[in-house]
Amino acid sequence: MERLPTPAGQQADIPDASPAPARTATATISEQGIVTGWSEGARELLGYTPTQIVGHPAARLLADDTGEQARRKTAGRERFSGQVALLHRDGHRLPRNLLAHRRTPQDSRPAEWLVVTAMTAGAASPRTPDSQALREWVFSQSLCILAVFDPDLRLVTANTGMESALLLPEEQMRGLRLPEITPGPASEEAETKMRRALETGQTQHMQAYLHPTGVSTQRGWSTSLTPLKDPGGTVRAVCLAAHHRQQEHLARQRMLLLNDAGARIGTTSDTQRTVQELTDIAVPRLADFAAVDLLDTPRRGSEPTRLPATGPITMHRTALHTTPDNPSHTSHDGHDGHDGHDGDDTHPASPPAAGEKILYPALSPVAQCLAQGHGALYEADDPALTRWAAQDPTAAWIREQKAHSVMVVPLRAHGTTLGVALFTRSRRPEPFEADDLWLAEELTAQTAVHLHNAHRHAREHTTTMTLQRSLLPQTLPDQGALDIATRYLPAGSKAGVGGDWFDVIPLSGARVALVVGDVVGHGIRASATMGRVRTAVRTLADVDLPPDELLTYLDDLVIHLAADEGGGAEGTTETAAGIGTTCLYAVYDPVTRHCTIARAGHPPPAAVTPDGTVRFLNVPAGPPLGLGGLPFETYETQLPEGTLLALYTDGLLQTRDHDIDEGLDTMFQALARPAHNLDTVCDRILTTMLTHRPDDDIALLIARTRALSTHQTATFSLPSDPAIVAQARQHTTTQLTTWHLDDTTTYTTELIVSELVTNAIRYGHPPIQLRLIHHNHTLTTEVSDTSNTTPHMRRARTYDEGGRGLLLIAQLAQRWGTRHTPTGKTVWTEQTLTPN
């Protein structure tokens, strides 16, 4: 290439296509028609030196009006070719064939035209053979298939490409028809098209898959059948020309393999299954043998082992696959395909089997591949393989099994190295090439991403399960109103753990609240929201709110949570902060056997009376939480002692094996069967209704009601008279003596009763009632009146005569509080009794 002189201030190297100096005249011309570059060949051709022509209009180099014609012909085009009359510096005309290319530089310089012309005007170099010899050489030496057939479609001549493709010399094929040379449908079709070319004088085309007789491997050829005409236009013969489409075929096969891998790799979250899918799809379509070694086989939910910085690397053979007739065939249990005579050491070495631990030396190709982070190709005689086999006996199988080509590719995803994949060819003769390495890297990248996601999902699942378990009740509270058994079963689907929960909350007056709820969504977000909602329920329950009021406050809370978060997470289907959460809240009083229930979009509870009758409690269906504006209603009923209550989330009914009606029938049948142990009832329901892990979480709470006997409660009606306080103390002392409680308890309770009754007389409205409840090592003292005024504890000043009563009660009792009723309020205290 010649270097063109350029004007000052420009930095441009203008290449010239001539292999020898001064054989091509070259110039560059700007879009404005100014000469910007001038070669030595151009000086020799037209007589101008670079300093005489660079920077001047190119039009002065053209004779006549050729310049205007050239501008019209090149307008809007990228190339121009044709004969142009040039003007020599001395004034004589030079008709020349010019070829001009419009070039757009990669930098910010403007576009320009590169104009070239051959100095010798097409004459051959003295070193060039005559054209007839060249034609003969092209025909005979071309790697494409070239053959000429006469009008009888018998072979006249064939080149070396034809001989190589069919494994026959020309002299043995001459005079034969193509179907006689290589029988088959492709030859029959080619002969038909040759006859058509002879008859029509038109070139015919076809795609042929030809192979020599006795050879099964077909090779794709794109074939043209061209009629050969004499100077008079008469068709005298036909030429068969074909070029090999092997690379195109291989590229298509690689794309198909990659496409199949997308559907076949990563079908489960199991690590071993995923890497086995990689080896299964790689053999035999890419390699004769494939194996995957992982740095570790991590426990579910744990982090994968990190790659050591230096030194040998310990890995675990996790999967392998080989062609059955491959010399390196090893079954998955690690035994080779030989009979195995004792003491016979002549068998070729076998590769490590699945499950074995492998120690790779620091200089082995595997260790180097992991350190460098990219794959590598090796031939059998590569020094790296030779050195590895000499250092590591476990690598001897590569040489022993005649693996002539090896690929080592790391499994990496999101910056983390998980392992390595090995591929070898021993049966297939073609060695691995760069495109095979690219394909292997794509396959391992897909596999690594699936492994990484499986680890991440497992960690998230473990974290969510831990959070979920920690937010659920760890132990059931000690209370005497209900016998209770619970079950929580997380979802088995990929969606992950949801936000189902249950709770048992002791209330004042020996009552107990039962709660079952279901937060919308799955994963950590749903579990965290469940924890917030459950905490809110317990807080509101401590205030002793009725079920409908509690759900109203809870509804407002969920709306506020949603407003704080500003909607659902982007790209998810989860609802913001639990909007749509369902909840059922029930309060049972063992003294009156009265049960009050309200629900927010939750399935109604089922009840089984002692006579075996199973029914749904007709609790009004309120809206799910977070919608706002709609009321919740309560349902009240009397439950005989021994009644079974079943509270559950909708995951119990939404199973793939049956519809909801069938699920209800199955649950009713399981509940109706007698069982003294409530754990048996829970297990019976789950085993009867579920045949596999559920698609949604299931929370199940089974409770059997108890009733406090009349001997465990004492109720006294008191007139609104300060003189009655002493009588109230006397009632208390008599009743506690009947219950055989000690003097200390009696003295403390007398003080509590005095303060509560005095406050009721002073600040409340009659009628006034005193109730004592002795249950489950607890003594409850209640004083009720019809006033809605809530007493508040305050700290009395030094000279105040009152204000110390509630402070004293708080010191004497373990718990105290106020609950409102439709007719007034009740102030209560609880004292924990020491068992005798």
Image (tube, rainbow, N blue to C red):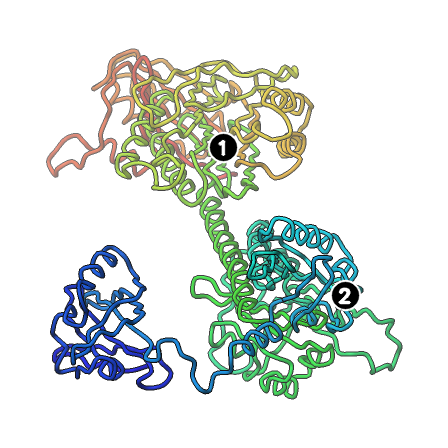
- Residue assigned mark 1: 479
Q: CA distance from mark 1 to mark 2?
A: 107 Å
Quadrant location of the N terminus in the rendered image:
bottom left
Q: Amino acid at mark 2?
A: Gly
Q: Residue 442 versus residue 571: which sits nearer the camera?
A: 442
Q: For the view shown, which residue lies furthest in the right direction?
A: 341
Q: Do the numbered discs 1 and 2 sit on residues whose CB atoms are within 8 Å?
A: no
Q: Residues within 10 Å of mark 2 (few under 14, many from 20)?
A: some
Looking at the rendered image, the disc whose residue lies closer to the viewer, 1 or 2, is: 2
- Residue assigned mark 2: 175
Q: Does residue 817 appear left or right of residue 33 in this picture?
A: right
Visible in this render: residue 224? no
Q: Amino acid at mark 1?
A: Gln
Q: Quadrant of residue 487?
A: top right
Q: Quadrant of residue 25?
A: bottom left
Question: Is label 2 in a helix, a strand or a loop?
Answer: loop
Question: Is label 1 in a helix, a strand or a loop?
Answer: loop
Q: Residue 111 versus residue 569: which sits nearer the camera?
A: 111
Give how far across and how far down residue 111 sits, in percent. Answer: 21, 65
Visible in this render: residue 329? yes
Give how far across and how far down residue 163 sits, in percent. Answer: 70, 71
Give how far across and how far down residue 593 sits, in percent. Answer: 50, 18
Q: Does residue 108 appear left or right of residue 511 in this picture?
A: left
Q: Residue 470 versus residue 244: which sits nearer the camera?
A: 244
